[in-house]
Amino acid sequence: MRDYPFLMFVIVGCLFLLPPPCRAFQISTEQARQMGEQIWKNECKKSVAGLTSWNAGEEFASLGIGHFIWHPKNSNSPFKESFPNLIKFLGKHQVAIPQWLIQADGCPWKTREEFMAAQDKEELRELRQLLAENVDLQIYFMFERLERSLPILMENLSAEEQEKIQRQFCQLSQSLAGTYALLDYVNFKGEGVSPQERYQGGGWGLRQVLLGMNLSDEPVKEFARSARSVLENRVQNSPPQRNEKRWLQGWLNRVQTYEFYSAS
């Protein structure tokens, strides 16, 4: 882990809300590392091989500890990719990026079959090494995304919905468990604002989870309850040919970690 003194988790625009306020929240380097390792475990059981994955039934590669999406060129997938932004982030932090990766115009492997056949080739071995050696920066990339997400979550909503999202987001961000839940879910299922990420008009991102929450003295448990409902609705509304039911139990197991998360 690189020597960062601390990560200041500050959500701009929340500091002057009505109670509960969204105060600056300090997360130590070790706490951030533990969150990142839990997310890596959620995605692929912390395996190095799992850093370069392409799930059966999906149209994209899933890379890194957060399984950041990378689409082949001209993909029609509705799911938002994030891997190219991760590579830019690593480059900004003086990480040496392989030339083939800098020059890539979309994921070079067009299908899962091509990707799996290339697992032992130089490019994917090199990519796994890059990702395994920069776990800490992937964590900070995820925090940067979370810190930018609040204004995005509130776009094109009514004043009442905006207030609800602010309030729930800020309340969750005041604890380690709540911060972990926000960080993991936005990385796991996105902000939920893209019109393309819909089944029968319903989204499944962080926006939908926050809007589905009720007032509670136990916000993390309420977040987990709402997330379960959102994910179950996604599966129910999904195209039958995607067979998303096969993934649901794993998704629900992941959400359950929010309720029992702790870090030193």
Image (cartoon, rainbow, N blue to C red):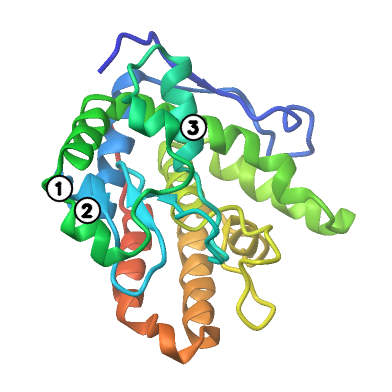
Q: Picture coordinates of residue 138 (x, y %)?
A: 37, 31
Nearer mark to the viewer, of 1 and 2: 1
* Residue 4 placement: quadrant: top left
Of labels 3 and 2, the one closer to you: 2
Per the model, the C-alpha gap separating discs 1 and 3 is: 24 Å
Do the residues under discs 1 and 2 have CB atoms within 8 angstroms? yes
Q: Is residue 202 above or below residue 159?
A: below
* Residue 143: mark: 3
Residue at the far right in the pictured view: 159
Task: Return the residue nearer the eye: 167 or 50.
Answer: 50
Q: Amino acid at mark 3?
A: Phe
Find residue 177 and report its horizontal and vertical position in percent: 41, 43
Q: Which residue is mark 2?
A: 44
- CB under 8 Å between discs 1 and 3: no
What is the C-alpha distance between the residues marked 1 and 2? 8 Å
Query: Which residue is identified by label 1?
Result: 49
Rendered position, 219 above or below 246:
above
Q: Amino acid at mark 1?
A: Ala
